[in-house]
Image (spheres, helix red, strand yellow):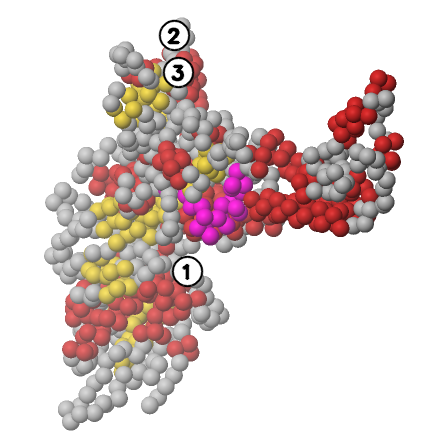
Amino acid sequence: MFRCKIPLLWFTLIALSRYNPVCGANVPLPMGVVFDQGTAEVQAAFKHALMTFTPLNVTRYSERGGDYGERFGFTAYVDTINTADAFKLSKLICTQFSRGIFAMVGAMNPESFQTYHSYANTFEMPIIIPWYPMKSEKVSEYNSWDNPPAAPKMDFAIRLRPDLHQTILDTIQHYGWKNIIYLYNSNEALLGLQSLLQRLTLTDNPLRLTVIKKIANVQDAIDVLRDIESSERLQIIYAFVLFGKGHQYHFNEIYRIRFPLLHRFSPKYILLDCPINLAKDIIVAHVRNIHLGRRTYHYLLGGLAFDEPWDETKEEFYAVNVTGFRMIDPNRKIVKDFLHKWATLDKNQFEGAGKRSISSNAALMYDGMMVVREAFTTILNDNPRALQRKVRDFTCSSGPGFLDTVTPSEHGRTINGHLRRVHVEALTGNIQFHENGTRKFFTIDVMELGSGNNKLRKIGEWTDYNGFSAVAKNAHNQYSHSSLRRPSGLENKVYIATSILVQRKISALTITNANMEEPYLMRKKLGGHHVSGNELYEGFCKDLMDEISKQLNFTYEIKLSMDGRHGSENPNAQAGWDGMVGELIREEADIAITPLSITAERERVIEFSKPYITTGISIMAFKPKRSTGEVFSFLTPLSTSIWFCVLAAYLCVSAVVYIVARFSPTAPTHHNQNGMSKHENHNNHPLHPNSINTPSTYATTSMTSFSSPYLDLKGRLSMSNALWYSFCVLTHRHQTTSVIKRSWAAKVVGMVWWLFALILVSSYTANFIALRTRNKIVSPIRSAQDLLESGYHNRIQYGTVYGSSTYEFFQLRKMRNKCLGCSKKNSEAQVFRAMFEHMGGTSQMNMRSNEEGIKWVRQKRGKYAFLLDSAINDYTNRRQPCNTMRGENKSGNPETE
């Protein structure tokens, strides 16, 4: 079998023979291919498809069994010219026809489409057009865009790219735009504008094109936008001079009355119909221009702009609202597999390939070859000899009268019919065709880069059979900043101020759908008085709103939030957000006055005032009770076991002193007749002079002065005296007996007992003073680390309000893989991630409101800690019953995070 490689045939016109083998295929299927200049990536996609789809999966068997070994494969005759030259293009098409091709693949511009189309229909040559030029069509009210009728004469053009005009109109209607600035750069785009205007005549859409301008480069677009804003400023001055003199009109009110369509700060919607690279440069230049606004602009890109990658490092792309379309979903398996192979291609052999993305034009070229493969495979599987030639001569000339004897393609109608019946899943989604050769049953993703967003988001889908369908998760994008229209005459409108209320029982009425928001907004204690409107409420938010309304001279009405929530992303809620944030997005309220934390997610969809309180996340724990004075509180400095040890030591030492003093030898003494020694008699107090000659008086006085109940008459130590001696040492009473003074052994025991008593009394005194004078109550939870360790050991459970800004704070720390900065911050980030794993795990104890969390802290009495805003924490701790306290450390401070 003869074999060859396709790279040797690429860009080489195969004219020596019609049946040159390609990649092991000995039955060639000639194809004519024409590329426009500067389409390297499209050519690489075609070359990759040719190598992938050749040979075809068709096997021919003989009647006796066995394989003939014949393989079918495509042979490509490639030409690259300037397709805008109609004369050269006509000659090239005739040259391709003369090569005996079965079909043509043409990548062309709008100027050359009519030439291709005419030749294809005249000679019945199927032609596959990857991207369909936006040509103007006659539109009538009887046209059905879901199923266009077949042309009276068979059309031999197959168009891979669908028409986006209806998609653009439905997207504009989804956003609710009324005025459009249309910027374009080519005649093709102008034809698209004509098609848009024709479709508008059949609808009741009050869309108005305020500016239509052709641009050639980036500077032209910026100049147009600057001229628009400059003219607005001049008209503002004119309006003020014309209407403001002698009248007390509000400046913005005058301007909106006179010029409602062009307002300096009104949103501006730009339909940008130009190549994607030029559109990117215009957006970047717009953001960098200091004379143009950002938040009031919204770009809608006319082509498949988001099929190509956008540089995520360019912050300019996320500074304004940009909406566009795509057909290549990178999450689909077929796209992932293709991009994996596409990235591994050699850039030298496949110029424009070797990357992880592909443009829409290149993808449509690849899909076109997939359609060709499916059609030819079906034909040959049904009848392997269906494409055998009987008529050899098939030429066309440009001489006079060449159309008089037209020889159509022998198998053109067969191939064209099978092409229209192809049903395949490709890079751009489902591929099926109407009888007129246009796509049907396809899906286009509507994508958005919003102001403040850091990634591309899908906001909806458009199908030819169902129109525009918003994606529930991101449906809030339809209420983007640029689509909001706020009145500027404050005095003529009653503004709705939404808020949430503290739960409080008043006259058997309980507000159950509100969070704990005291002292921000509370219902008044009526006390039998009848009030209505805003007078039903009191609190900080009410007072602040009163002052604002006085300063700006407008009227407002307080309306409580329906679900009592601050607001978080909720795919089940209308506009994608619940709570007060959702009411603002849906324009059910004009202002939310409440302690609402500023987060990046909320700031993308609503506007915040300048923050007047900087706070953070704190821990609320149950406050331990103070120890009150009791009868035996003097025993608290020492434990019970120590007190028993002291008692045992007291008894043992007393016994030792008694034994030692009892049996130790004493000095000889001389006793008088009353049993007193001379030594003791000399040391006695002097007697009264009157009793010197009276022995009885002397004896009585001696016994009264020196006898003791703890000493026997012989001068020996008793047990009771030993106990008294040991007790006096403990209480530091300086009292002893003469027996201990005369016994050295007793002195040693007493000295040891004195030392023990000194240490014991000193320790007792220090502990007693510390316990009785300590006023500060130490929190059992000092930091997030303590809380985390307590949670590990199941000593203390903890949680926060589910879906609140505090919950999102820990959720973001969980999503981050690392923390930039010092090691301390990195350590804190690890703690926060571990805490969120606990709060989001099976043992989570998150609450629906702050009030419920505070209630749990009080009920669990030290077994549950609640994470909440530090300002609310401090306020609650100072309110009755005063049984909660705050942890010492505070996290989540915007100034430090």
Alpha carbon distance from label 1 to label 2: 61 Å
Q: Quadrant of residue 195?
A: top left
Q: Position of residue 368 (x, y in %)?
A: 29, 65
Q: Which residue is mark 1?
A: 357
* Observer-nearest of 43 and 508: 508
Quadrant position of the N terminus in the picture:
bottom left
Q: Is residue 183 left or right of residue 877?
A: left
Res. 247 mark: 2
The part of the image, by quadrant, that contains residue 852 is: top left
The residue stretch that appears in magenta: 779-804
Which residue sits at x=72%, y=39%? 712
**Kind of residue sitting beneath label 3:** Asp
Q: Residue at x 84, y 17 (%)?
A: 690
Instruction: Name above or below for residue 873 compared with residue 474.
Output: above
Does residue 724 appear anywhere in the picture?
yes
* Residue 190 seen in render: no
Q: Quadrant of the C terminus?
A: top right
Mark 1: few, some, or many residues within 10 Å (few <14, many ≥20)?
Answer: many
Q: Nearer the viewer, residue 324 or 885?
A: 885
- Pick whichever of labels 3 and 2 is earlier in the sequence: 2
- Residue 477 vs residue 725, the one in the foreground: 725
Identify which residue, 669 or 841, lies in the foreground.
669
For marks 1 and 2 on the same chain, the one whose residue lies earlier in the sequence: 2
> Which residue position holds label 3?
546
Q: Nearer the viewer, mark 3 or mark 1?
A: 3
State if disc 1 and disc 3 touch (CB < 8 Å): no
